[in-house]
Image: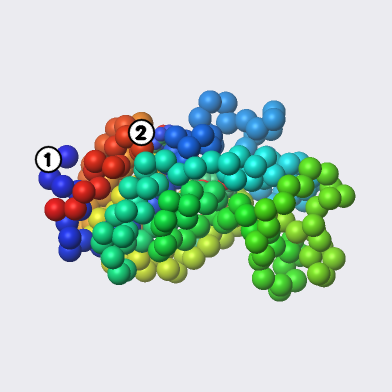
Amino acid sequence: MADRLIHSEDRVFVLTGAGISAESGLPTFRASDGLWAGHRIEDVCTPEAWENDPELVWQFYSARREAAEKAQPNPAHRALAELEERLGGDAFFLCTQNVDDLHEKAGSRRLVHMHGDLFTSRCSAECGRPPAGDRALYMTKESIARCGCGAMMRPHIVWFGETPLEMDRIADELRRATVMLVVGTSGSVYPAANFVHWARQTGARRVYVGPEAPLNATAFTHVVTGKAGEVLPGLLSIE
Ligand code: BJW
């Protein structure tokens, strides 16, 4: 891009996906064969999977807890945290589809996890007790933690068919943004894949960064091809 992406008077909305954590060693969903231990990802990311086999679901999320615990933020996570610091106030907002905590580890503050949080669990019977921090690994059905009401605890994750979190706040921040930056997401999962269309209606500049064009590429004003950790640090200087 010839001009700087971000100017000091801009309000920036960032949407990140699994690709931003790839350079930290966490696999994306749709890369390679999209399988986990012989199961389709879709088969462990649905309420039906939980009903059929909570042990398998917890093995999947326990393995991901272990990997995310060890992972460190990469230059892309750090560049976004630095941008937030430089813009200050409420001129920066980060919406991540990721359930890892690499944005927090990098220092991001104004962020929401629209698909949930790997290190939180909640009552599977929705008894009304609030979600709680939980870093434990559950490899057998017997070991799965129980809520005070007696029901099994489930991962605090948004599965297919469930309602994403913080949608009102996300819509509000998108309405006010002058720049939308999308990083490392295939544009195949809704409603996140629609956010760029919402931003188009308000006239915001819409930039995608990733090694390949996403499915919704035509809705962007710019597509920057490259790995997030290599592209973002240079792209995010403010004019
Ligand atoms: C790099 C890189 C590097 C690599 N640097 N980049 C038919 C039509 C339309 C919609 C539907 C439909 N049927 C059903 C739906 C709705 C459904 C849906 O979208 N289904 C699709 C399969 C079509 N959506 C839902 O059910 C959602 N809920 C919903 O819609 O409720 C209704 C509602 C809406 C609005 C308001 C109120 C109510 C819920 C979706 C839940 C998604 N859950 C998951 C799993 C849980 C989280 C977890 O376990 O981690 O979320 S699925 C999975 O996909 C995960 C991700 O967050 C999400 C997106 O994946 P992402 O991040 O895009 O990863 P990849 O692997 O696809 O792409 C990685 C990208 O990185 C690639 O492009 C690479 O090129 C790139 N990359 N290296 C930068 N170094």
Horizontal side, residue 187 vs residue 9: left or right: right
Q: Secondary structure at mark 1?
A: loop
Q: Nearer the viewer, residue 203 or 104?
A: 104
Residue visible at 49% across and 65% down in the picture:
166
Q: Amino acid at mark 1?
A: Ala
Q: Which mark is residue 221?
A: none
| Front residue of this view, candidates 100 and 171 | 100
Where residue 157 sits, quadrant-wise, is bottom right
Tell me: 152 left or right of 196.
right
Could you say whether the residue bearing mark 2 is in a helix, strand or loop?
loop
Gap between marks 1 and 2, in whole Å? 19 Å
137, 13: nearer the viewer: 137
The yes-or-no answer for disc 2 within 8 Å of ligand 1 is yes
Specify few, some or many for label 1: CA neighbours under 10 Å numbering under 14, 14-19, or 20 or more. few
Name of the residue lying farthest toward the bottom: 128
Q: Is residue 160 left or right of residue 232?
A: right
Residue type (three-letter) at the residue carrying disc 2: Lys
| Residue 121 is at least partly visible in this image | yes
Q: Is residue 111 above or below residue 72?
A: below
Q: As drawn, which residue projects farthest toward the top? A: 32
Vertical placement of residue 130 versus 36, above or below: below
Could you tell me which quadrant the N terminus lies in? top left
Image location (x, y in percent) of residue 239: 14, 53
- Image colouring: rainbow
Q: Which mark is residue 2?
A: 1
Q: Residue at x 26, y 61 (%)?
A: 87
* Residue 161 in view of the camera: no
Residue positioned 30% across, 69% down in the render: 89
Q: Position of residue 53 (x, y in %)?
A: 79, 45
Which residue was labeled with disc 2? 227
